[in-house]
Image (cartoon, rainbow, N blue to C red):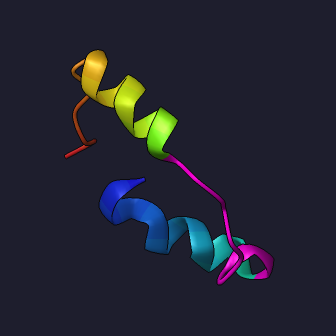
């Protein structure tokens, strides 16, 4: 979510501060697919 996570959490107060676990596999996919931020 890069820099846009603050907007997400503005609408999902219940999820702020929760542990979302290991995201390394998702980061590897992003890198492999040459994904860029939404900027």
Residue at 27 percent of width and 42 percent of height: 38
24 falls in the magenta region: no
Front residue of this view, candidates 25 and 7: 25
Measuring from the top left, give residue 1's x and y in whole percent: 43, 53
Residue at 40 percent of width and 24 percent of height: 29
In the image, the segment drawn in magenta is 14-23
Measuring from the top left, give residue 33's x and y in whole percent: 30, 15
Find the residue positioned furthest to the top. 33
Instruction: Please indicate whether residue 35 sits to the left or right of residue 10 in the image.
Output: left
Instruction: Please indicate whether residue 31 sits to the left or right of residue 21 in the image.
Output: left
Eyeballing the image, is 31 above or below 38?
above
Magenta: main secondary structure: loop
Eyeballing the image, is 13 above or below 26?
below
Measuring from the top left, give residue 9's x and y in whole percent: 60, 74
Residue at 37 percent of width and 30 percent of height: 28
Residue at 74 percent of width and 74 percent of height: 15
Eyeballing the image, is 31 above or below 6?
above
């Amino acid at each position: 979510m890069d820099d846009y996570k603050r907007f997400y959490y503005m609408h999902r107060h219940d999820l702020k501060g929760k542990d979302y676990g290991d995201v390394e596999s998702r980061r590897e996919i992003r890198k492999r697919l040459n994904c860029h931020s939404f900027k």
